[in-house]
Amino acid sequence: MLVRVTSTPTATFDDITSSNSSLRRFLHGLPGVDQVGAEARAASLGTRSIKTSAKEYAIDLAIRMVDLTTLEGADTAGKVRALANKAIRPDPADSSCPSAAAVCVYPDMVGVAKETLGDSGVKVAAVATAFPSGRAARDIKLADTHDAVEAGADEIDMVIDRGAFLSGRYLDVHDEIRAVKQACTRPDGTSAHLKVIFETGELATYDNVRRASWLAMMAGGHFIKTSTGKVQPAATLPVTMIMLEAVRDFREATGQMVGVKPAGGIRSAKDAIKYLVTVNEVAGPDWLDPDWFRFGASSLLNDLLMQRTKMTTGRYSGPDYFTLD
Amino acid sequence: MTDKRTAQKTAQKTAHKPVFDYAPAPESKAIVDIKASYGLFINGEFTSGSSKNAFKTINPATEEVLAEITEASGADIDTAVKAARRTHSRVWGRMPGKERAKYLYRIARIIQERGRELAVLETIDNGKPIKESRDVDVPIAAAYFFYYAGWADKLEYSGYGSQSLGVAAQVIPWNFPLLMLSWKIAPALAAGNTVVLKPAETTSLTALLFAEICQQADLPPGVVNIVTGAGETGRSLVGHEDVDKIAFTGSTDVGRSIARTVAGSNKKVTLELGGKAANIVFDDAPMDQAIEGIVNGIFFNQGHVCCAGSRLLVQENVADEVLERLKRRMSTLRVGDPLDKNTDVGAINSAEQLGRIRELSAIGEEEGAGRWSPTCELPDNGFWFPPTLFTGVTQAHRIAREEIFGPVLSVLTFRTPAEAVEKANNTPYGLSAGIWTDKGSRILWMANQLRAGVVWANTFNKFDPTSPFGGYKESGYGREGGRHGLEAYLKGTN
């Protein structure tokens, strides 16, 4: 059913990606997704009841997985500094609270974020490639990426060309991802991690989400990400589940692990826990790590903190006890 | 920061990889009030009955005794049937349909209101996971009452006339106690019949709680009578000369003997018996959902489902891959305390049933099939059987022919659609079947060829009050649910 790539970690897909038609054949040969069944499965995972010690574990893990995001036209250096500080110390009142995974900003804010974050371990992610629409010439997208990497971005969140994908020009999408990945290389030979955003709200079907997942993984993306947060619907549990199935199957086929990042629309700790249950039961516990699963979010963090405080003190505090950034 | 948290942090850091271990999340038992002993519900009241015989009902997950249940004697059955007869001729049979509907709607709403209580009680008495009693049994039971309430004043449009039969004798199994009760009682009452219902001896408690609900709904006395007991009680009920209709769900053996008992009489009979359903997976199936469907088909309710997909027919060219995925998925099933909200597979309903599952599984092994179960710790007390699959099974194996009625899946392969149909139909049963393929035309072709009362396409074990359900061949006759379900409770148009 699925491709069996016999070679190990350095698997290449040269045969499949040699032409648009062979790539198309491969992507359309992936097993289909039954929408009703997939949504029912996701809903049933959402009914898991996570309590006491399991909830404590899940909340701390979710905090460590947050890519704290601000992607506004109105972003300023001050705003980004505030956000970066929040990512380092999400709960100033409790030093046992872990840091977030990263701060996610536009490329021109990378320098500011980097300066504030220093060696805190919190990463800087930059959205590049004419985010969020991706409608620009390729050299502009690559220049956008170069700029962000040069400014010190640890991670690049790129958007795919949905127009090309929906019109069946899969190879264009593939080649562009490869080119952006190339552009992530730093002069010293190391490379920024690449997250590939599908904007699943525009791909519309689960079959397309599965195809986009394989396409991005074959092109070398380190992470696959649902959405920009600018289009509705953004991340949903069934879409994320389909992507988790894809990374699980990809590892089975190639030995390579790829991360998953749902972004946009996840606002409560309760929702975040549903995602973690899905990660645990669909992809497996290996993915329960900020290296392999992230939440693209902003308001989620404060709800996680509130629930965390509730777990330790037994009481809910008002929203004024948590910082707004 | 508390010391506890620090300690945990350190433990997490030192451990190689902390696992996301779901902490226990038990549903509280406080909501149910189980009495020490229960009488019979006859003519709107609980009575002690004429016999002094009683039996114990236990929690199959712990073997703890829950209550004593009265065993109804022949004389008690007679009293119950007389009460039902009297109420039918004086009250219920004459009542306008729209008035009967009000009672049914009221019952449906009370089932919803007391849903949690019913779910917890069902789980304690039956052993099924709370997530199933809460999300499947109770909501669908209420839905049947709502659905048939809607029919009560529209019987003339049913195509089966609007004349009730009289008194219905109903005998139900232990696998879905409350749900099977609603499948039986809702259409009977909507059509203007009164009922005497006997729940299975291991699972009487929700039927007795339903009796309380009838009182709460002010249902006229004698419309619903609940008589508890085992095989002998059931025999006196279906053999009673003044019942007009017998509805039975249970084993094919008992169904056969019921058919013999009523042969030559004027009693109408519907039988919903065993099954050995084929769940057929083609190579173009939506694979992840097919795996879910296989799991749901056989491990839902511990496989205590007459329409369970107990034979997996998988196309040979994807068999290895399907098995690999299925095993991986089975390894995530959580077996244990049925009251824990995260439990997927609960307890086997009785020691007797566990014995039968063990016996047939042992035969499967002796006959050379490959047995596999995920590693799972089973509780010490109670009746437990791990989710199990057998590979290399052929049509000649007993585990491919006999109904196991447990969490045991037999895996067979096929090469072509015609072969799939041939193997699927090669069973004395014919209750249900499942087809998994992305090709709509193949679904329709297959559904036409399969001799099964229900054929699911890209799903399994879906029940809806608007859809008729019933079997071919040794799986019984008559239909329950939908407009068709009314036929069994109406006199017809001639």
Image (cartoon, coloured by chain):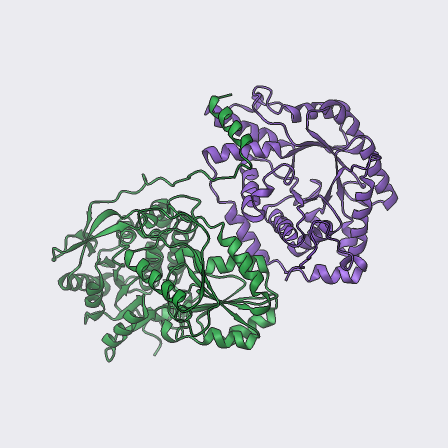
Chain colours: A purple, B green
Asked whether, in this view, residue B334 is left or right of residue B70, the answer is right
Q: Is residue B219 visible?
A: yes
Looking at the image, which residue is at 47% across and 25% down? B4
Q: Nearer the viewer, residue A224 or B357?
A: B357
Locate residue B370, reporting x and y percent. Answer: 46, 63
Locate residue B120, reporting x and y percent. Answer: 34, 46
Looking at the image, which residue is at 79% across and 27% down? A111
Direction top: furthest residue? A93
Asked whether, in this view, residue A137 is left or right of residue A236, the answer is right
Q: Nearer the viewer, residue B77 or A118?
A: A118
Q: Relative to residue A103, is residue B227 depicted above or below?
A: below
Locate residue B96, reporting x and y percent. Answer: 31, 62
Asked whether, in this view, residue B334 is left or right of residue A208, the answer is left
Looking at the image, which residue is at 87% across and 41% down? A140
Q: Is residue B463 visible?
A: no
Q: Nearer the viewer, residue B112 or B274?
A: B274
Locate residue B490, reporting x and y percent. Answer: 33, 70
Look at the image and tell me in which quarter the N terminus of chain A lies. Answer: bottom right
